[in-house]
Image (cartoon, rainbow, N blue to C red):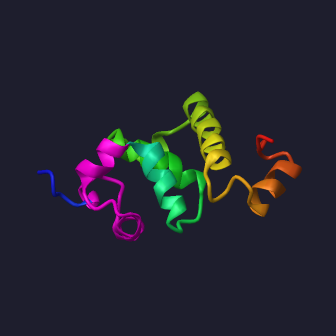
Amino acid sequence: MSDEPVTTISGIGPATKTQFDRAGIHTALALRDMGADAAYLRLIETGTRPHFIGYYALHMALQGRPWNDCKGDEKKQFRERYDALLAGSSGFADSSFLRMLDEIGVIAVPK
C-alpha cells in the first residue's frame, strides 16, 4: 500500500503525476503525509507554474472530493492560503509576477 502511485488518488492524472515525479513525490502515501500545501509548494519550487485551480484541486483530491466541489467560503479560504503560500515561497516572493499582481490589486505581497 505504501508504494501506490499518486495517480491512485482520484483527481490526480498523468500530467499531474509528471509534476509530482519532478518534485520527488512518487507515492500516494508520501503525498498524503506531506499534505497539500507542502506538496504544492514543492511543485512550484520544481518548476510547476502556479495556478489557483491546481492548488485547490489538490486539496479536494486529498479529501476524496471532486475539484469542482470547492465553492463559496471554502474557496475564499483556499484563495487566501494560496496567496500566502506564493508570497512566502522562496521562488516567488520576489518575482516580478507577484509584484505585478500586487500592483494591480489581485494579491497583497508582504513587504
Dominant secondary structure (helix, strand or loop) of the stretch shown in magenta: helix
Q: Position of residue 19 (x, y in %)?
A: 42, 67
Instruction: Name the residue at 28% across, 60% down.
Output: 7
Say if residue 67 shows up in the picture: no
| Residue 78 located left or right of residue 105 | left
Extent of the magenta region: 6-34
**Number of dots carrying numbers:** 0
| Residue 65 located left or right of residue 107 | left
| Residue 15 is inside the magenta segment | yes
Give the farthest residue toward the left.
1
Tell which of 17 and 109 is nearer to you: 109
Which corner quadrant of the image does residue 49 belong to? bottom right
| Residue 43 is inside the magenta segment | no
Instruction: Say if 80 sits above or below 3 in the image.
Output: above
Tell which of 29 and 74 is nearer to you: 29
Which corner quadrant of the image does residue 60 belong to? top left
Q: Position of residue 63 (x, y in %)?
A: 35, 38
Instruction: Name the residue at 38% across, 71% down.
Output: 18
| Residue 24 located left or right of residue 89 | left
Which corner quadrant of the image does residue 44 belong to? bottom right
Q: Position of residue 17 (x, y in %)?
A: 35, 66
| Residue 39 located left or right of residue 95 | left
Instruction: Name the residue at 25% across, 57% down.
Output: 27
Give the farthest residue toward the right.
103
Quarter in which the C terminus is drawn: top right
Say if residue 63 shows up in the picture: yes
Tell which of 67 and 2 is nearer to you: 2
